Amino acid sequence: MTRSASLKATELGTQPIRILLFKYALPAIIAMTASSLYNIVDSIFIGHGCGPLALSGLTVAKPMMDICAAFGSFVGVGASTLVAIFLGEKNYEHAGRTLGNVIVLNIILSAVVMVVGLVWLEPILRAFGGGADTLPYARDYMEIILYGNVVTHIYFGLNNMLRSMGHPKTSMAATIVAVSVNILLDPIFIFVLDMGVRGAALATVISQIIAVIWQFIIFCNPHELIHFKKGIWRLDRQITLRSFAIGTSPFLMNIAHCLVVVIINRQLVRFGGDMALAAYGIINRFTFVFAMIVMGLNQGMQPIVGYNYGAKQYPRMLRAFELTAFCASVVMGIVFILGECTPVWMTRIFTHDAGLIDATLIPMRILCCSMWLVGFQMVTGNFFTSIGMAGKAIFLSLTRQVIYLIPLSLLLPVVFSDPLSGVWWSLPVSDALSALTAAVILWRTMPQFKLAKPQSTD
């Protein structure tokens, strides 16, 4: 182990928390913003090159892509959290073995997802709303994505590992490389080679292959604190079980999100028609930009909290959580202000249709009224994931989308005189209840850290 590699890890336990959070969160926010930009540009290329039905097919395929991503986070998030904890404990042997386990587990799990997905591709896509006109586009796109699923899982898994090792900028650079190559290849495959949606999917897989090659070059460097070497590839039962336990929270959250999207969409179409569904899409796009910032803050917090938890430096761990929760609350507070005070301006960013603008104004005010609570809830759930408290993290990941939102979305339309209003109000009520639940669990957990004797740094 080189001195510079060691310093990269130990800075998590020595540098001021404000500096660390800025250093780790900013690259993550930039990377997630770049990914968001790619999704927009990719949709533009597909829309102009393949037509509106292709875009509808892509919408049908998205829940299946989210499920594939959920299985990737099952391994990647759990293992990267373990690495941060092991580095804090200065258990470099287990940290290295976790790296090897990430590769092996991702290969096994992604191969299973690929085979299952390809065998039952059409029934799955039909279940997500694929019809005679849109199914061919969704099928063509997902076939390529599934064939490249192993690469996708390894790419995201190693990016999480880079952040936990003290390389947030390298992780950001890998994302930007993948996004840039993807945007460059899209017009070539779609317009020049006339490959349609298959070309767009192929561009995605190739861009990730290039990023993975770069990641492998980094992890093959023997001067890195954690790198590829003999003896790390054999699956370790304890590491595997702990990775899965920690990764269960983001896994269930992604799966629950897919389920909620299906239920809410059906309720909105049932009581409000396509216009209500379009309004929900606008509000989601508006809030998604700010939610990505909070997710970037969470990614920046994770290695800091995990390392200091492993090092038993609990005051630093709590300070990182408190600062992240404050920043996330400010970010989502901006959503609250914009949604309540300037809903017309926010809606006109996405449409100039007067009817759709009118249909969006009241729902935007309803959904944004609880947004100032969402940042705290998101950070609290990620905090428990970052310190390996899988049970609490899993419960909090399910509160908003399963325990509260699904029942409320079915109950409130019956209670309200206007069923559509009941669907809209189910969202902020579930936000408030899940934030309250997170606060109670946090309040009951904090004393064990505040009373524990912190370990001195070295």
Image (cartoon, rainbow, N blue to C red):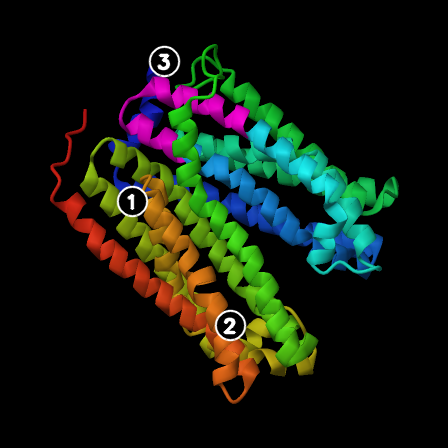
Lower sequence index among marks 2 and 3: 3
Q: Residue at x 67, y 36 (%)?
A: 114
Task: Measure the C-alpha gap from mark 1 to mark 2.
Answer: 40 Å
Question: Mark 3 = which residue?
Answer: 1
Point out residue 65 in the picture as x, y percentages from the top left corner: 64, 47
The amino acid at mark 3 is: Met
Q: Secondary structure at mark 1?
A: helix
In front: label 3 or label 1? 3
Point out residue 105 in the picture as x, y percentages from the top left corner: 53, 28
Task: Measure the C-alpha gap from mark 2 to mark 3.
Answer: 54 Å
In front: label 2 or label 3? 2
Q: Residue at x 38, y 23 (%)?
A: 95
Depth check, front residue: 301 or 383: 383
Question: Mark 1 = which residue?
Answer: 18
Depth check, front residue: 242 or 284: 242
Q: Are marks 1 and 2 in contact (CB under 8 Å)?
A: no
The amino acid at mark 1 is: Arg
Residue 98: image quadrant is: top left
Residue 396: image quadrant is: bottom left
Decide if residue 46 is in sight here: yes
Q: Which residues are magenta?
A: 81-105
The amino acid at mark 2 is: Ser
Quarter placement of the N terminus? top left
Q: Residue at x 81, y 40 (%)?
A: 188
